[in-house]
Amino acid sequence: MPTRRTARAVVNVDLPGPQISRHLYGHFAEHLGRCIYGGFYVGPDSDIPNEAGIRLDVVEALRALNIPNLRWPGGCFADEYHWKDGIGPKDERPTMINTNWGDVEENNHFGTHEFMALCELLGAEPYVNGNVGSGTVREMSEWVEYLTRDGDNPMVRLRRANGREAPWRVPFWGIGNEAWGCGGNMRAEHYADLARRYATYCRDQAGNKLYRIAAGAHDRDYAWTEALMKALNPLGCTNRPRGYYQGISLHYYTLAGPWHAKGSATDFTEDDYYRTLAAARAMDEILAGHSRVMDCYDSGAQVGLVVDEWGTWWDVEPGTNPGFLFQQNTLRDALVASVTFDIFHQHARRVVMANIAQTVNVLQAMLLTEGNQLVRTPTYHVFEMNKGHQDAHNLSVHLSTEGTSRAYGEGELRGELETLSVSASVKDGDLLVSLTNLDAGEPVTVNFDLRGGVVADLTGRILTAAAIDGHNRPGEPDAVVPASFDGFTVADREAGAFGVGLTVELPPHSFVTLAGRVG
Ligand code: AHR
């Protein structure tokens, strides 16, 4: 007889922890496949409703997520991108070959002005990623001036000649990308010196303060993180790292297998599913490892960890360009996102920003487009259901689980996955609890003890599907959408007891949010 899966969760609603930066819900748009062209940008002459070429259905869908920031133009593309090719009259802009992604010709019709217009339409803050790999210090420094400087000087005159009078506000600046790989195949110490040098000339202009982000490690490359931290605080003996750059990035992708056989986005076994979720949960141990290294050189957590590429990476959809990284997105992807957010919330002291790769038509996208059709993926719905965590304060969830782990695979591929994941936050008296049951076939009962306050007006929402590979597609865009959820009961408490008992019955493979008021 199967054991009843139950767990106990204790949350002190009156003891808020670190703030969950809204920037953990950031996005990434690269000149890759159909992310920019066809995804965000269709050109002003398109039949698809647009504003100066930017798709309005995409803007409307993303505005509902309150997306806080958008990283652009790459990725690997950033280290081949020369920004002056993307300004001025479109028919005079030089073209280039996008050697990283499909070897296709890039016409530079989407450039600096178009990106800034997109951010304004989205209400998102721009995160511009500069070119270290094949660019110069001067080129990067002039880009900062072009965007953010005021007065009467060469870059400002150029910007004005291109139709923009006032400087823009650009809070986030990337100093190259994946410098250990497509960004120049550098060694860590060499890149660390370059990051200090480039950052020196990316100056704060009046009224604009840059948060400079050095190109960090991937996965468990803790030595890379250490080299970047040492470059700010050589002996680690002061708690005041130098401020050449304020953040260090980290890239971690979730795969179910090796890079040469990543598997299908939609056609996978239950073992593949569990292996994927185990890989997603490894984010916790990876963030802890990088944070430990950073703590040695920066005990006060002044330097932020910026996970500016994360998400699932599958084999491309059959028949599509292998360089375009177009993949479908199922409930499995959505649950990768929900457990990853729980992990980000728990690391909110050090992790200040994260950007899922990528927003439209590439990797773990929010939106898929086909001609004039637009599909919201299951992952999109997790971002929407979780948006109340943005800028809220994390509440520690003390979980004691019983039989909620699941063994999968065989032989060397055998593993064990904890299938329950929970996080909670509070903001101005608004409580949001997110719960994920990763078990493919069994429900789980979670008995909450919400201590230190009175919780009222709870409402629930659920995202699930008949099967773990449920997904949305053109013609069937609403197969996997949130529904209201009433699978919870609030226990009566003795008069005078301060706190609330709450029991939640989570169906298999589901993501649930409960929202209420704390008094
Ligand atoms: O997101 C796709 C690619 O993955 C990015 O261009 C690169 O930075 C990473 O390797």
Image (cartoon, rainbow, N blue to C red):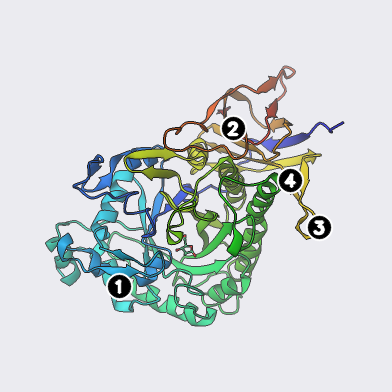
Is 279 above or below relative to 405?
Answer: below
Is 306 above or below relative to 119?
Answer: below
Residue farthest to the left? Answer: 161
Residue holding disc 3: 411
Q: Amino acid at mark 1?
A: Ser
The structure residue drawn at horizontal position 44% and vertical position 62%, both measured from the top left corner, is 323
Q: Nearer the viewer, residue 157 or 512?
A: 512
The structure residue drawn at horizontal position 73% and vertical position 36%, both measured from the top left corner, is 9
Using residue 467 as the reference point, say whether residue 327 is left or right of it. left
| Displayed quadrant of residue 259 | bottom right
Q: Amino acid at mark 4?
A: Glu
What x and y, as percent, mark residue 484?
Answer: 55, 24
Q: Earlier in the sequence, mark 4 or mark 2?
A: 4
Which numbered circle lies on residue 141? 1
Instruction: Determine the CA span between mark 1 and mark 3.
Output: 54 Å
What x and y, as percent, mark residue 497?
Answer: 72, 23
Is 165 above or below relative to 483?
Answer: below
Instruction: Determine the CA span between mark 3 and mark 2.
Output: 30 Å
